Image (cartoon, grey):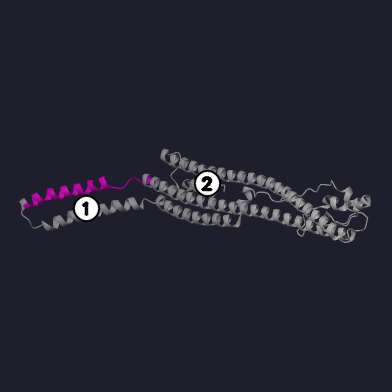
Amino acid sequence: DETTKAKKLQPSGDLSGALQLSESPHGRASTAGLEVPDTPDVEDGVVSSTVSVVDVTSNKNASVIVSIGDGIVAEPLEKLMTNKLVLEKKGEFEKKFESLRRKHEKERSRLQSGKGSVDGEKYKSKFYNNKLVKRLSTKNIFSTDVGLSVTLPETSECQEEGVEGPSKGLPKSQSERLLNILKEHLDQEKELQDKYHDIVYAMVEKVMITSQTNQMKTLKVLLEREISSAMRRLQKLRHLEVKQLSKVHKDKAEFDRMKREVGKTTIEKGVNECSRLTDIYDKKKAELESQHEEIRQKLEEERNKVKAAIQAEYTSSYNKYESGELALTPSASTSFADTLSKTPY
């Protein structure tokens, strides 16, 4: 009798081998045809519980490897740079920079094309000097000879002072004025470039943080889904085992005792399965965090690299204007602008 009972109770100790975890969203296993001793059915890539007692025993030590978040990898920097929000900021910069450059080109061309400003000031100065002499002469035309003789030197002196005055107060030469304007334009272009450099890379960083945060949330959801799936499967297996015991044990006390044993075993299996899945999750989480940190470092390196390139090009152009290596012409003065417009974002 005891031998027969032991054989009949054998399924209760061997159901641990039938625990299979599904990577499918529902994570359910078919329970139909439990008594059929054929090859186990496969549903969604998971061995179902449609196996005989012998089959369950033979699969007792079978291990099921569950992966969590295998398809989740950190977004590369290149992809972050082409995000829609980042491209919008780049386009905004390009429009403003092109508008500023056209404005500067007009100013440089206008200054380069003529001596108008300098010649105009000379003509204006000469006109006022002549007017001053004429007023003095008219006022004293009916004066005595002595008065006239006194007035004439004053007129002559005023005329000389009038000629010498503008020469001392004339603006700088045309080349010096052009040089100052070019330097001012360089400063304005670099200021705009620096401003949008910060804006663009701040947007890239924002997109990166959002992406990485969402990936971590998704990984957590996948863990919870796998744990929930495992618990449902364990509960279903427990129900099947209790059902089998009810057919074997007619004594209520013995049945209750065996039912408690099955429940205890199921809880232990659940704890072990949760621990196993959590270990898989922790490993994937650490791997993903490492990838995220690598992307953050790359972003910072790229940000500093571009910033240094902008400063180096600005300094080079500025020094060339100072030393006279770069011709003071509108075409030559756009070299820095051309470089900035091709900034390697």
> What residue do we see at 81% from left, 47% from top?
63
Closer to us: 337 or 202: 202
Q: Is 70 in the magenta?
A: no
Task: Please provide percent x and percent y for residue 329.
Answer: 45, 46
Task: Please provide percent x and percent y for residue 179.
Answer: 40, 45
Task: Please provide percent x and percent y for residue 30.
Answer: 84, 60
Q: Is residue 29 visible?
A: no
Helix, strand or loop for disc 2? helix
Residue density around tag 1, few if under 14, some if 14–19, many if 20 or more, within 10 Å: some
Closest to the camera, between mark 2 and mark 1, is 2
Q: Is residue 284 visible?
A: yes
> What residue do we see at 58% from left, 52% from top?
209
> What residue do we see at 37% from left, 47% from top?
177
Closer to us: 114 or 292: 292
Reading the image, the residue beneath label 2 is 339
State which region is magenta: 147-175
Looking at the image, tell me whether mark 2 or mark 1 is earlier in sequence order: 1
Q: Is residue 220 above or below residue 328?
A: below
Residue density around tag 2, few if under 14, some if 14–19, many if 20 or more, within 10 Å: some
Q: Is 166 in the magenta?
A: yes
Reading the image, the residue beneath label 1 is 129
Going by the numbered disc 2, the residue's amino acid type is Thr
Helix, strand or loop for disc 1? helix
Going by the numbered disc 1, the residue's amino acid type is Asn
- Is the magenta region chiefly helix, strand or loop? helix
CB atoms of marks 2 and 1 within 8 Å: no
Residue 204, label in figure? none
In the picture, measured across the screen, residue 256 lies left or right of residue 157, that is right
Closer to us: 234 or 109: 234
Q: Quadrant of residue 249?
A: bottom right
